[in-house]
Image (tube, helix red, strand yellow):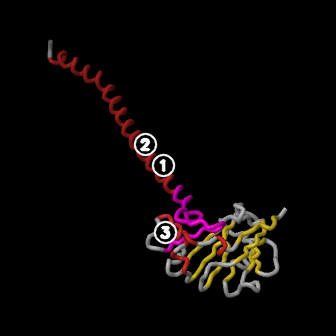
Amino acid sequence: MNAADRAAPDRRARADGTPGRVVGAVRRAIRRASTVSLILYTLALGAGIGLATADYATRGGYPFGGVTVGAWTAWPRTGSVGADPYARAVNARRSEIPLAVGEGMLLTAAQDDAGQGLDAACTYAIAGITPPARAWTVTIAGRGPRDPAHPSLREGFTSTEILREPDGRFVITLSPEVQPGNWLPMPRASGPVRLALRLYDTPVAASAGTLDRAALPAITRTGCAA
């Protein structure tokens, strides 16, 4: 047997093993690609869920730290150094500087005294008094873009311009239609709205949990558009 005959089996063995090595390499490449794709998919899914939940948590009002008093919710710590991360994120998203504990306190209302959500298509009476404060404001804010067909005529009242009853009480009419007296127009034809009551230089800022329901204005629905 010459040298050529002896080398033939080696060549056939290498030829027979080549497809197996190729298939093995392809399988390993597919496994590596699948692992990388799975990692990238997991990262993308986690980022998407994180962004979606963060957007949901900071889109409306403050999610934590509220003290409910009737239809109103007080937020005594949103401007303090101990404010939670969600409150700070909401303030950053709104580009607002919240009231510090020594400056005042914010209260919001998204429903009336009966527990029904405030609707821009309805009319409400905001009547009563406020806790002791050097000054206060009542403003209305929508939970969405304003309607261009409804220009903003007024967004709120201050304690210095409000028309009061002889006993010091006041009545603000929140309505989409023009009303006599203290009329606060709705920002749109329909949809949810929210009220904000800000008390400046008030002693109750440090003890929001002791607020009495009778010390805050009542919110009563008086009618809705057909």
The quarter of the image holding the N terminus is: top left
Q: Which residues are magenta?
A: 52-79
Give the residue drawn at x 68%, y 64%: 111
Foreground pick, 93 / 27: 93
At which x and y percent is residue 165?
76, 84
Give the residue drawn at x 79%, y 81%: 181
- Mark 2 crowdedness (10 Å alpha carbons): few <14, some 14-19, many ≥20: few
Amino acid at pointer 1? Leu
Please identify, in this view, whether the residue under mark 2 or under mark 3 is nearer the observer.
3
Amino acid at pointer 2? Leu
Q: Is residue 148 above or below residue 17?
A: below
At which x and y percent is residue 29?
36, 37
Q: Quadrant of residue 193?
A: bottom right
Q: Is residue 158 above or below residue 195?
A: below
Q: Which mark is residue 38?
A: 2
What secondary structure is marked by label 3?
helix
Foreground pick, 143 / 47: 143
Badge 2 or badge 3: first in the primary sequence:
2
Q: CA distance from mark 3 to mark 1?
A: 25 Å
Evaluate if marks 2 and 1 touch, with contact meaning CB atoms under 8 Å apart: no
- Mark 3 crowdedness (10 Å alpha carbons): few <14, some 14-19, many ≥20: many
Q: CA distance from mark 2 to mark 1?
A: 10 Å
Which residue is identified by label 3?
88
Horizontal relation, residue 10 to residue 222: left or right: left
Please identify, in this view, whether the residue under mark 2 or under mark 1 is nearer the observer.
1
Magenta segment includes 2: no
Which residue is identified by label 1?
45
At which x and y percent is residue 37?
42, 43
Give the residue drawn at x 81%, y 66%: 223
- Mark 1 crowdedness (10 Å alpha carbons): few <14, some 14-19, many ≥20: few
Badge 3 or badge 1: first in the primary sequence:
1
